């Protein structure tokens, strides 16, 4: 996996919770069906606009809430990385384990307007607003956790090591 | 600089002698808990004798898909000869059950996918929600990693006033201090002696809504008594070093607290004294979940509704945290009292708390709940509003039909 991802940004506020990503009625659905309902309560129609290669930006406490696998949903929608002021610990785990690069970066919402293009070195923490030239520096996740992301997530690790049956 | 209790438990389970904030620590897991389903492609397990399997979120199965998931779990139990299994009929909400059955033990590390796993911090047990993928890793390998965050020492002083509860304490703190994303809470202070295990379990459970990594209570006389004859395995409690490292100290004088209601949508910076929202009309009142589905919650709800009737047009739902709690609530007459008032007492399940398979809210409705979350759409329609209060506040509001101070009834 490349240490940099580049894409058009979507901006979300503080305290974006898991139930907004995967609503109650979608909890038991397959991942493919869950994708259709992401943010249906707070931003109806977003899943029709988001494109593979886009980047998610959010405020403080991103991913607060349940164990619902938000990383898998964003990954499934083609989001290439998430940059947020701060992450809920479980939300962070679910991004890492889904192989979706997360970058904690206080102040991220101040340097982007929605639709700008971000270039994010999630390994070093350097964020560039390609549209305006503005920069901001995040606090990258530790190397040991970057390795899980780079391996493609935790299931890929297990499958490679023979703990899971071949697909 | 010494270590706090959270850092010591992490160090005890790792190859590191000391653990400090900023570390990523790899630990051996003691107990693994899994609910509702199991994967068919798992080939080998690290520690099947320390695996606890149960059904809780959607039970008994409300859909064919849930039934198929449950069937996969039963097949998994057979395939790996799992001893610690709670079939439907002996079921309960995972966090309630691991406390009740003595699987969550002091000084140990317990894992479970579910976000309210921090509940077991009440037992001086290091526990947090792991998410579904991570559980797969732990089932196979028996170990995991934790980001070590800074720890806040919360000192509880004084005694809670009449009809103010531990649930109000755990609403008050995020109302004053916001979220604790990436951080830990350790509970201290003389006031703890007056908070029983049910109350501590409520506080540890709702710590998830404060976005904490871990929420840890001390091993003291209250916990020792609770574990007597209950603990499934030997354990070694962990206490903080005298010169332990804390990021900050928060002191709460519980004698000054009012009942606290959390407004809809989020928990950080969103609590009010009940008086500030009194009069808000409600359509549904719910008491249950891993936060407040315990016997003491039934007791206070029954005390408040006894001899009264629910307000016209209000539904009240009460869900026990386990089959055992339901049996006790029946024996003690709480179920009859609640039903006489017009409440519905349900089977034990996560059910209404997550709008899973019953008790959903309609467009424009308002719920006052003593469950775990107030997020938009959490308990049904995204156009409904969810306020959170203690079981006493919920019961008083159900009788009045509007959010009501439980000290006024």
Image (cartoon, rainbow, N blue to C red):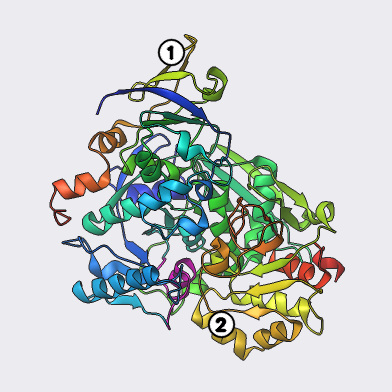
The residue lying at 73 percent from left, 61 percent from top is: B159
Q: Which residues are magenta?
A: B89-104
Task: Please tell me in which quadrant of the rendered image residue B270 appears.
Answer: top right
Q: Chain of mark 1?
A: A
Coordinates of residue B226 in the picture (x, y in percent): 51, 74
Coordinates of residue B216 in the picture (x, y in percent): 50, 54
Q: Is residue B37 visible?
A: yes
The residue lying at 26 percent from left, 59 percent from top is: B139
**Residue furthest out toward the top:** A133
**Tag 2 secondary structure:** helix
Number of marks in the image?
A: 2
Q: Is residue B91 above or below residue B146?
A: below
Task: Please tell me in which quadrant of the rendered image residue B189 appears.
Answer: bottom right
Q: Is residue A55 magenta?
A: no
Badge 2 vs badge 1, beta-carbon distance below 8 Å = no
Q: Chain of mark 2?
A: B
Give the spatial CA distance, label 2 vs label 1: 60 Å
Residue identifier under label 1: A130
Q: Is residue A93 visible?
A: no
Q: Is residue B101 magenta?
A: yes
Residue identifier under label 2: B326
Q: Give the quarter of the figure containing the C terminus of chain B.
A: bottom right
């Amino acid at each position: 996996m490349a240490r940099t991802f580049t894409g058009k940004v979507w901006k979300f506020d503080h305290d974006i919770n898991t139930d907004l990503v995967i609503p109650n009625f979608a909890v038991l659905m397959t991942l493919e069906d869950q994708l259709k309902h992401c943010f249906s309560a707070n931003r109806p129609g977003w899943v029709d606009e988001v494109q593979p290669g886009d980047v998610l930006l959010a405020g403080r406490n991103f991913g607060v809430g349940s164990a619902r696998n938000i990383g898998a949903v964003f990954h499934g929608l083609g989001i290439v990385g998430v940059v947020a002021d701060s992450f809920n610990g479980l939300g962070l785990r679910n991004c890492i384990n889904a192989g979706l690069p997360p970058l904690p970066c206080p102040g991220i919402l101040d340097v982007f307007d929605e639709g700008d293009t971000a270039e994010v070195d999630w390994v070093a923490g350097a964020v560039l607003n390609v549209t305006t030239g503005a920069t901001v520096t995040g606090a990258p996740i530790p190397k040991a956790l970057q390795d899980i992301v780079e391996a493609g997530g935790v299931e890929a690790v297990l499958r490679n090591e023979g703990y899971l049956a071949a697909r | 600089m010494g270590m706090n209790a959270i850092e010591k438990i992490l160090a005890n389970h790792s190859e590191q002698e000391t653990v400090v904030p900023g570390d990523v620590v790899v630990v051996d897991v003691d107990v693994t808990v899994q609910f509702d389903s199991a994967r068919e492609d798992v080939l080998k397990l690290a520690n099947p004798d320390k695996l606890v399997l149960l059904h809780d979120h959607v039970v008994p199965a409300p859909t064919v898909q849930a039934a198929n998931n449950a069937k996969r779990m039963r097949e998994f139990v057979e395939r790996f000869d799992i001893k610690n299994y709670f079939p439907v009929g002996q079921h309960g909400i995972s966090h309630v059950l691991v406390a009740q059955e003595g699987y969550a033990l002091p000084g140990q590390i317990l894992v479970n996918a579910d976000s309210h796993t921090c509940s077991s911090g009440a037992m001086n047990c290091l526990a947090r929600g792991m998410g579904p993928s991570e559980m797969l890793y732990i089932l196979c390998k028996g170990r995991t990693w934790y980001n070590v965050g800074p720890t806040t020492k919360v000192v509880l002083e004084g005694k809670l006033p009449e009809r103010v509860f531990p649930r109000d304490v755990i609403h008050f703190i995020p109302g004053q201090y916001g979220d604790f994303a990436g951080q830990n809470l350790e509970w201290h202070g003389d006031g703890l002696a007056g908070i029983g295990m049910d109350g501590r379990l409520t506080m540890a459970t709702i710590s998830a809504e404060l976005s904490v990594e871990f929420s840890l209570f001390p091993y003291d006389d209250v916990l020792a008594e609770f574990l007597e004859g209950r603990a499934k395995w030997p354990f070694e409690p962990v206490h903080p070093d005298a010169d332990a490292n804390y990021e900050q100290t928060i002191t709460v004088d519980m004698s000054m607290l009012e009942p606290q209601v959390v407004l809809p949508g989020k928990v950080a910076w969103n609590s009010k004294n009940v008086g500030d929202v009194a009069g808000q009309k409600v359509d549904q009142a719910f008491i249950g979940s891993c936060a407040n589905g315990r016997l003491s919650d039934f007791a206070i709800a029954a005390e408040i509704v006894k001899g009264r009737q629910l307000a016209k047009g209000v539904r009240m739902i009460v869900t026990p945290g386990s089959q055992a709690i339901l049996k006790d609530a029946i024996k003690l007459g709480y179920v009859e009292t609640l039903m006489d008032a017009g409440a519905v007492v349900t089977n034990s399940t996560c059910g209404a708390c997550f709008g899973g398979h019953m008790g959903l809210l309609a467009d424009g409705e308002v719920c006052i709940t003593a469950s775990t979350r107030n997020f938009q759409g959490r308990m049904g329609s995204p156009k409904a509003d969810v306020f959170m209060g203690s079981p006493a506040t919920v019961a008083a509001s159900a009788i009045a039909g509007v959010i009501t101070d439980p000290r006024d009834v």
